[in-house]
Amino acid sequence: MSRKEAYQKKLQAQLDEWDAEINKLKAKADAAEADTRLEYYKHIDELRSMQESVRNRLAELKASSDDAWDDIKAGIDSAWDSLSNALKSAASRFKK
């Protein structure tokens, strides 16, 4: 397995895990009071948007040549970090 393939599998596994976490947050939002629910939904929409951005970049990575994937990887890593941080932040807000 090439480094590119290993990286793709790692990204896909993490995206799947984050999807499950976002679904758990949505379930908490569904059970929250009306005013809190709207705030939670806003955060969930932002997370889904960021997740979609990472998925699009993963698709670009899959379509890239083995030589060009290092250039794409930097952009993915940045989007990845943003999504990770946003998910952690949202999870901590939902615990309150």
Image (tube, rainbow, N blue to C red):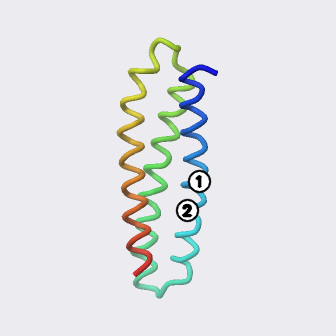
The C terminus: image quadrant: bottom left
Query: Image quadrant for the N terminus?
Result: top right
55 displayed left or right of 81: right
**Label 1 close to label 2 by CB (< 8 Å):** yes
Residue at 41 percent across and 51 percent down: it is 83
Residue 52 to residue 37: above or below: above
Q: Amino acid at mark 1?
A: Glu
Q: Residues within 10 Å of mark 1 (few under 14, many from 20)?
A: few
Q: Quadrant of residue 13?
A: top right
Element type where label 2 sits in the image: helix
Distance, label 1 to label 2, CA atoms, is 6 Å
What residue would you read off at disc 2?
21
Q: Residue at x 44, y 78 (%)?
A: 95
Badge 1 is on which residue?
17
Q: Residue at x 47, y 88 (%)?
A: 33
Picture coordinates of residue 8, whole percent (x, y)? 57, 32
Element carrying mark 1: helix
